[in-house]
Amino acid sequence: MATSTATGVLRHSLLAVGARTEIRDLAMHLPAARSFAGRFVAGETRDDALRAVLALRARGIQATVDFLGEHVREASQAEAVAAEYEALLADFAARHLDAQVSVKPTALGLDVDEALCRVLVGRIAALAAANGAAVRIDMEGSAYTERTLALFKALHGEHPNVGIVLQAYLRRTAADVEAMLQLGASVRLCKGAYDEPPTIAFANKAEVDASYQRLMERLLLEGHRPAFATHDPRLIRHALWFAAEHGVGRERFDFEMLYGIGRPLQRRLADAGYTVRVYVPYGREWYGYFLRRLAERPANLAFFLGAALRR
Ligand SMILES: Cc1cc2nc3c(=O)[nH]c(=O)nc-3n(C[C@H](O)[C@H](O)[C@H](O)COP(=O)(O)OP(=O)(O)OC[C@H]3O[C@@H](n4cnc5c(N)ncnc54)[C@H](O)[C@@H]3O)c2cc1C
């Protein structure tokens, strides 16, 4: 999401430089990077993810679990990611957990073979449904928006437990929200975490926040169990106020936050009787996720560089 111009430039540079293979290889071996990523990632294994889900449950908080990774280049890699989700769902079933999973289309082969990606997400959705759980299709960079929406539409009829993510920073999203309302789709609304040009995305924080607020109001009035994925206290206060003002009960929408961010806020909302779901990422492919968390908050970059230089 673009914030002020300075933050926007920083974000653009960090995401562009960080995407280079040599930087990625270097960073993944830096102890400071691994330790900083540990703030946002539950761990490398399924057991780590399960432990995090159970700890959240003990605090009255739901989870959606993401097996980290993106942009696979071969069908066999997409199959392996699907197999990991299937094993995760089997572990949930064994513990009678109805935790949701979040999937990235490019981790499940969107770039390799769209039909295969559809089959794999469908398989995951069917298993999740047997647990009484849902699957959320994450939204990646704008090169994938159309294909991700097409994937969602192809699955939605047969798998009503599949939901989609829309990004408030994209100018197109007001129209996409209307289309999803027509379909009866469950939408997770986030601000957006990728580097997008101003031709297609709002260029500063005030515009992104205003877009988020408009779309949130629309989803509160007409949405099908929308999820508001933000840690922004002002927008969360607005959701609470708007819902009360329009008689939208707390059982009709959820709040979602990222693992390691906004814990006191998660707690306060859960204690007040709202459904709070935390996005729990795990796995060895933490780099892309870590980079986006670094890029969306300059304070994180300063903290990380400080830790790296001290070593
Ligand atoms: C459950 C969930 C799912 C998501 N799924 C997607 C997706 O599919 N596609 C996508 O593009 N984006 C996704 N995002 C990321 C989202 O788009 C934003 O990049 C991210 O949530 C930060 O925006 P914000 O709404 O918290 O608002 P901001 O205005 O960025 O932040 C508000 C406050 O939150 C805290 N905060 C925000 N980010 C951080 C951070 N990295 N470290 C520490 N504190 C922070 C700070 O206190 C900050 O002041 C998801 C976010 C959540 C919560």
Image (cartoon, helix red, strand yellow):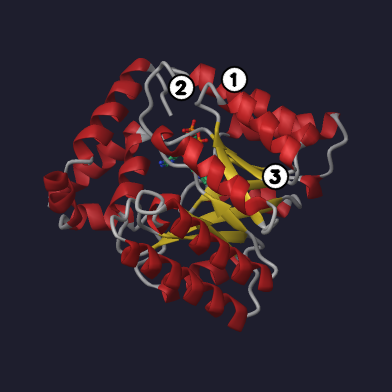
Residue at disc 3, secondary structure: loop
Q: Are marks 1 and 3 in contact (CB under 8 Å)?
A: no
Give the class, few, some or many, for how many residues have Cα within 10 Å of label 3's Cα (few <14, many ≥20): many
Residue at left offset 63%, top offset 73%: 97
Instruction: Examine the image and state in which quarter residue 302 appears.
Output: top left
Give the class, few, some or many, for how many residues have Cα within 10 Å of label 1's Cα (few <14, many ≥20): some
Q: Position of residue 244 (x, y in %)?
A: 83, 34
Q: Which mark is residue 210?
A: 1
Q: Which mark is residue 185?
A: 3
Q: Which mark is residue 201?
A: 2
The tag earlier along the polypeptide, 3 or 2, is 3
- Above or below, 152 against 131 in this view is above
Is 2 situated left or right of 251 in this image? left
Residue at disc 1, secondary structure: helix
How far apart are labels 3 and 2 at the CA level?
A: 23 Å
Residue at left offset 38%, top offset 26%: 196
Foreground residue, 125 or 188?
A: 125
How far apart are labels 2 and 1 at the CA level?
A: 13 Å
Residue at disc 2, secondary structure: loop
Number of disc labels: 3
How far apart are labels 1 and 3 at the CA level?
A: 23 Å
Q: Which three-letter amino acid code belongs to the residue tagged 1?
A: Ala
